[in-house]
Image: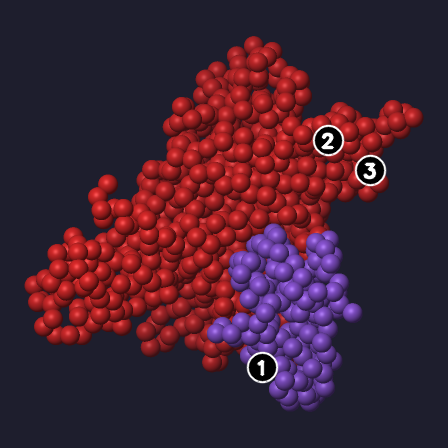
């Protein structure tokens, strides 16, 4: 253990300054320091993808990132995508297609898909399945998640 | 049909519609609440030191300098908890069975790698884990037999000396004369089949939080469990607390598939520590702990023999099963739950007169096996369906035709199977025909010939199965278990604001029961769906609850919801009739409105509620009824749910990997409450079956160590490993229960491994090979095919 260090992390548009242990995981920082419990932890070794957040716009495993590494960076979590009264577009597609069951992996998928929609072609099912293959879901068999992404990708059209 | 009946029948129903889920908005926005999301004042955290020995005596536990860990609160082993807790004992009426006691921490001896030994409490999980490094345990290793074939021997080292044997369950089911049937049969096929050990692996790891209320001397446990009611009863006994002071809540739960459906050491532990420390105590398993200490599944060695007449008629079936149940008999289901179910369901949906099934459940130094989606039937179906394909090949018959010849047909229900399971009416034949048609079976056989001519290893696999769901009080869900799992109570009440609150003992963990039960209630009560709130997952809601497992909730809770709604509707209409001064038989309720069929009179549920509760004098006290109803439903027997899976698989000749090309499921789950949710259950269950068939395997080495201890080693299906499947819903004659529902949450996991194994075997049939062990990993297939590669090259020259 070493002494706490001061960091400032911009999460969903708000700057948070905290003194944290250098070993504190970003996932624990978000969940336990900031109370943003929408980000879930499923394996703590970077396989399951439940803890996926956006760091400076790109998807990343918050369980493999130390909070101190996020100092000065922009973090986006599921809480930024929408509210119960006003779901975001990806969230709506998930609800319409029944792309979630227990919901534990869902925030990770939502954040991964936000990134994929900005940066990946997602032109066919093979590409969509490949894009989703870094996130584990144990309930849905992925079929309805793929259907939701298919709809979102066709709505978006080809990327530049 | 009367006028009234017609108006009810013509009304669009919520049951049967693709209603979007009530649960989704909270789960999609991160506002769901899983156990680890709950934060209480003064909460402390537990880390657990687990055994690194498969079988050893605990000689001494030493703790180093604790001042080096700020925030450390206490270190506890079993001696610190003596006298504060009674063990949980998974009793059963099975003859000759030995019930291993369950303690919160290992008591003088460890019996598997991963068993909890020492608990550390600190003000953060980080500090608690730091302190784990201060603890040293001196073990005296004991001999052990890690494989079931060794553990079953009479001279094998004993895990529980008190039992006097490692074989704690032994059962035999018989009908007819199997020896004669086999001796006189023109065709007998046999094989040894095994689905290796696996684990449920929900995405949320097991999580527990206990709070002790010093004022009421009461405990509340929040647990990621799908059986909060059973856990409450178990803890009430173990901690000697009445239910009024022991509450168990399962908030949002991140999947279970059976893995969170047993009592766990840590549930007892956090309760004990919370009471001792008078502070909230949280424990969340990490993935290593999950893989090394959550209940596991399968791992039965099945020797099977099927005797068949020349015309394809099944004459007799014999199976001898050794189930490796790990180090303890799981609470409350017992170690018999998986292996005994294998011989109970081995004949499947087929007519077989002569049967002999024997099972031995054997203790080995591994985490206990417990319920996992499908329970026993994935293995029994795998063995049976492989035997059928082997027989078809021997007879030169098409495997689909051979199944059609032997499936129980419409005129033959109810059919009693040799082990005594009764199939009520279900669409066995129609599922087979439906799947055949949907996948274009006959055309596929033509395609397969062409593909084979091009040198491709492609195969078509079929499996048919039936499962018993919605089991009532007539039969225990687990063999000889004294706990009642056959009833559900619904308490439905309309409060003074007109809100409808429906409480159940079930515990939804992804099934969307808050939605489907609200659909049932809104239809039956005539209220608006938005006005219904379904409460579940909390032992304090109804007097006796158990949870959601064994494909029971739609059937039993759906039945209770139906009955309670009908009774409550009677009350609402009687009160409305008085207020409206209309005859009650003229009134009908729909979407929150009560209307008269003979006049323009109408009022809302809210107005009725106000009249009953708030407007003094509107309803005379001698006819006034509270708008609350409690109904308990018991379907007594269970109902069959059946299905046929057909898939097409290709084995890659370079990598030996298996790719699924097509997948069809035809299923009969009775009256469908929400087709969207039913499809989702099938998709997810089939994906888990694909995992069991191709990827997932828990491996222990000869030293008793877990080799597959991360998700990089224990492989779950990814989006790129599975495919879009087609589902055909067949609604045959409805089961004779309230609602007409059959349970269907598990089925996909039962059918898929067998269908895939048959498809791979069909692909490899030209080499004379077949699958007897799952998962069929590339390594396993390579080892299977390698000895034949030379012949193969000769043939292709």
Residue A34 numbered tag: 1
Q: Colour of chain B?
A: red
Query: Is residue B318 among the parts visible in the rendering?
Result: no
Q: In whole angstroms, how far apart are the C-alphas of marks 1 and 3?
A: 52 Å
Direction from residue B467 to residue B7 in the image, left or right: left
The residue shown at (33%, 54%) is: B523
**For residue B166, what is the image quadrant?**
top right
State whether residue A109 is above or below residue B323: below
Query: First in sequence: mark 3 or mark 2?
Result: 2
Q: Please state the horizontal and vertical placement of residue B774, each as a whole percent of the image.
A: 67, 39
Q: Are marks 3 and 2 on the same chain?
A: yes
State whether residue B54 is above or below residue A156: above
Report helix, strand or loop for mark 2.
Answer: helix
Q: Are marks 3 and 2 in contact (CB under 8 Å)?
A: no
How many C-alpha atoms fall within 10 Å of the one at disc 1: few (<14), some, or many (≥20)?
A: few
The residue shown at (56%, 25%) is: B403
The residue nearer to you, when weighing B400 against B718, is: B400
**Residue ID for mark 2:** B447
């Amino acid at each position: 253990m070493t002494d706490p260090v001061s960091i400032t992390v911009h999460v969903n548009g708000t700057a948070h300054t905290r003194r944290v242990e250098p070993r504190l995981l970003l996932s624990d920082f978000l969940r336990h320091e900031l109370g943003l419990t929408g980000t879930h932890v499923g394996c703590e070794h970077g396989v399951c993808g439940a803890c996926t957040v956006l760091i400076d716009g790109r998807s990343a495993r918050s369980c493999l990132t130390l909070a101190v590494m996020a100092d000065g960076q922009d973090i986006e979590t599921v809480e930024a995508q929408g509210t119960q009264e006003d779901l975001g577009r990806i969230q709506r597609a998930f609800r319409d297609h029944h792309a979630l069951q227990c919901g534990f992996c869902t925030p990770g998928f939502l954040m991964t898909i936000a990134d994929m929609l900005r940066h990946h072609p997602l032109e066919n099912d093979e590409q969509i399945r490949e894009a989703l293959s870094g996130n584990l879901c144990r309930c849905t068999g992925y079929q309805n998640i793929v259907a939701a992404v298919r709809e979102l990708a066709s709505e978006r059209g080809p990327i530049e | 049909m009367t006028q009234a009946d017609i108006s009810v029948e013509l009304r669009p129903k919520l049951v049967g519609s693709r209603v979007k889920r009530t649960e989704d908005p909270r789960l999609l926005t991160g506002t769901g609440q899983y156990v680890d999301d709950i934060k209480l004042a003064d909460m402390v955290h537990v880390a657990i030191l687990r055994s690194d020995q498969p079988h050893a005596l605990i000689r001494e536990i030493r703790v180093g300098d604790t001042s080096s860990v700020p925030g450390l609160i206490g270190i506890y082993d079993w001696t610190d908890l003596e006298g504060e807790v009674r063990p949980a004992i998974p009793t059963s009426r099975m003859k000759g069975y030995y019930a291993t006691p369950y303690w919160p921490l290992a008591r003088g001896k460890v019996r598997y790698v991963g068993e909890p030994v020492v608990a550390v409490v600190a003000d953060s999980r980080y500090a608690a884990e730091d302190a784990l490094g201060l603890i040293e345990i001196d073990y005296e290793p004991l001999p052990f037999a890690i494989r079931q074939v060794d553990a079953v021997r009479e001279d094998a080292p004993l895990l529980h000396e008190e039992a006097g044997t490692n074989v704690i369950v032994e059962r035999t089911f018989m009908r007819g004369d199997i020896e004669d049937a086999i001796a006189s049969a023109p065709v007998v096929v046999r094989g040894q089949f095994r689905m290796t050990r696996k684990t449920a692996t929900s995405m949320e790891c097991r999580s527990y939080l206990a709070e002790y209320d010093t004022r009421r001397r009461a405990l509340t446990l929040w647990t990621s469990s799908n059986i909060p009611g059973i856990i409450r009863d178990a803890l009430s006994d173990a901690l000697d607390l009445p239910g009024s002071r022991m509450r168990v809540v399962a908030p949002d739960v991140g999947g279970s598939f059976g893995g969170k459906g047993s009592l766990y050491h840590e549930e007892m532990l956090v309760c004990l520590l919370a009471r001792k420390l008078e502070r909230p105590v949280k424990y969340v398993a990490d993935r290593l702990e999950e893989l090394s200490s959550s209940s596991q599944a399968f791992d039965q060695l099945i020797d099977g023999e099927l005797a068949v007449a020349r015309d394809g008629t099944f004459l007799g079936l014999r199976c001898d099963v050794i189930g490796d149940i790990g180090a303890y008999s799981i609470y409350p289901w017992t170690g018999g739950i998986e292996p005994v179910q294998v011989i109970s369901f081995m004949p499947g949906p087929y007519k077989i007169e002569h049967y002999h099934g024997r099972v031995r459940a054997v203790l080995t130094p591994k985490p206990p096996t417990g319920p996992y989606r499908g329970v026993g039937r994935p293995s029994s179906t795998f063995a049976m369906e492989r035997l059928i394909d082997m027989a078809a090949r021997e007879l030169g018959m098409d495997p689909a035709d051979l199944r059609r010849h032997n499936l129980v047909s419409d005129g033959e229900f109810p059919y009693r199977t040799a082990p005594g399971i009764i199939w009520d009416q279900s669409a066995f034949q129609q599922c087979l025909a439906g799947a055949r048609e949907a996948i274009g079976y006959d055309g596929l056989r033509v395609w397969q010939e062409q593909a084979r001519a091009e040198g491709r290893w492609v195969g078509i696999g079929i499996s048919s199965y039936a499962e018993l769901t919605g089991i009532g009080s007539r039969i225990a869900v687990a063999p000889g278990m004294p706990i009642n799992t056959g009833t559900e109570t619904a308490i439905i009440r309309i409060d003074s604001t007109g809100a409808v609150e429906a409480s159940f003992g079930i515990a939804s963990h992804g099934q969307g029961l808050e939605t489907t039960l609200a659909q049932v209630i809104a239809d039956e009560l005539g209220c608006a769906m938005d006005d219904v709130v379904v409460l579940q997952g909390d032992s304090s809601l109804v007097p006796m609850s158990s949870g959601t497992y064994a494909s029971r909730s739609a059937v039993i809770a759906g039945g209770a919801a139906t009955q309670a709604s009908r009774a409550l509707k009677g009350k609402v209409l009687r009160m409305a009739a008085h207020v409206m001064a209309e005859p009650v038989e003229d009134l009908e309720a729909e979407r929150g409105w009560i209307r008269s069929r003979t006049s323009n009179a109408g009022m809302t549920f809210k107005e009725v509620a106000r009249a009953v509760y708030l407007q003094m004098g509107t309803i005379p006290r001698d006819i006034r009824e509270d708008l609350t109803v409690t109904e308990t439903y018991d379907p007594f027997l269970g109902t069959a749910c059946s299905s046929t899976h057909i898939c097409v698989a290709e084995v890659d000749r370079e990598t030996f990997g298996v790719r699924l090309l097509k997948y069809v499921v035809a299923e009969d789950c009775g009256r469908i409450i929400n087709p969207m949710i039913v499809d989702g259950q099938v998709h997810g269950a089939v994906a888990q079956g694909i995992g069991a068939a191709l990827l997932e395997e828990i491996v222990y080495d000869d030293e008793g160590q877990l080799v597959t201890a991360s998700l990089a080693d224990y492989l779950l299906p990814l989006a790129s490993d599975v495919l879009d499947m087609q589902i055909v819903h067949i609604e045959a004659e409805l089961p004779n229960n309230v609602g007409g529902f059959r349970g269907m949450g598990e089925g996909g996991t039962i059918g898929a491994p067998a269908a895939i194994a048959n498809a791979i075997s069909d692909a490899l049939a030209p080499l004379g090979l077949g699958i007897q062990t799952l998962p069929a990993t590339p390594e396993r297939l390579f080892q299977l095919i390698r000895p034949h590669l030379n012949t193969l090259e000769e043939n292709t020259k």
